[in-house]
Image (tube, rainbow, N blue to C red):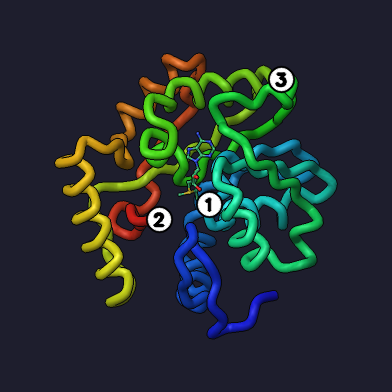
Amino acid sequence: MAVMGEEFAVYGRKVDLKPWLEREKLELSTLNRVFSKIQLEGLRVLDAGTGMGYSAKYLAQRIGSGVLVTVDIDPGSLDMLRKLAGVELIDKLIFIKADLRNLDFVKADYFDLVCLYYTIHTIESTTPGGVKRVLEEMHRVLKPGGLLVAVENYATFEPIDDAHRLLLKFSLIEKEINSILAVASDIEYDPEELCSLLEDSGFHILNYKDVGQGCIDPTLL
Ligand SMILES: C[S@@+](CC[C@H](N)C(=O)[O-])C[C@H]1O[C@@H](n2cnc3c(N)ncnc32)[C@H](O)[C@@H]1O
């Protein structure tokens, strides 16, 4: 496991590791609420959008003899995941650098569960125009009756500390600059909008709910 006070790179920027480990507690409570009623043991799971690796780590600890594949277009996320997961867990998961719009190395109907944990809102800024294609691809790789779990951002939230507050400020400035320059940026979907996007991509909505208005971080990179 990583040492506190150590630095590591988040999307190429050197940052102190400690707050990111602290933040894991916040993520863990959300992940627990989302997955509390889902039996993960033995499943073939796709964690779509590795990012920092919070969801990958969480799932790796709970699949038992199952398979966990985590995919990100950014190879840098493997380093973040390594830091977070540590040596014991990293052996339990498979990281693949790939574009979620096209996972042609995965056969159809392969996964029991696909997890999009704070990934959907980043697809447009990462791969413009890609949301529909990603959702359709998730539908293809999920077996019939399989489960897609999507967790997204909220328009408001409470920063946990000053650094967090600053990060939010910067992200809002970045958003403004992007809109002036007409650069694609993250898109926040409200639940109804997301449900219709999912339905358009072939999914049947079992249920959705607000899992923590005010405590979810829209600046999650
Ligand atoms: C906010 S992060 C996900 C957080 C992550 N699940 C966690 O628990 O830390 C979103 C990730 O999705 C990835 N991403 C966005 N669009 C993608 C695409 N088309 N293909 C692959 N990865 C993509 C981004 O590179 C980013 O790392």
Residues at marks 1 and 3, CA–CA distance in whole angstroms: 24 Å
Residue picked out by circle 2? 220
Q: Is residue 104 above or below residue 162?
A: above
Disc 2 element: loop
Asked if residue 182 shows in the view, the reply is yes
Q: Quadrant of the N terminus?
A: bottom right
The residue under label 1 is which amino acid type? Answer: Gly
Q: Earlier in the sequence, mark 1 or mark 3?
A: 1
Question: Which residue sits at x=60%, y=49%?
Answer: 75
Residue picked out by circle 1? 51
Asked if residue 39 shows in the view, the reply is no
Residues at marks 1 and 2, CA–CA distance in whole angstroms: 9 Å
Question: Which residue sits at x=62%, y=36%?
Answer: 98
> Is residue 215 toward the left or the right of residue 44 in the image?
left
Residues at marks 2 and 3, CA–CA distance in whole angstroms: 30 Å
Residue 49 screen position, x and y as percent: 55, 43
- Answer whether labels 2 and 3 touch (C-beta < 8 Å): no
Q: Earlier in the sequence, mark 2 or mark 3?
A: 3
Disc 3 element: loop
The residue under label 2 is which amino acid type? Answer: Leu
Disc 1 element: loop
> Is residue 7 toward the left or the right of residue 112 in the image?
left
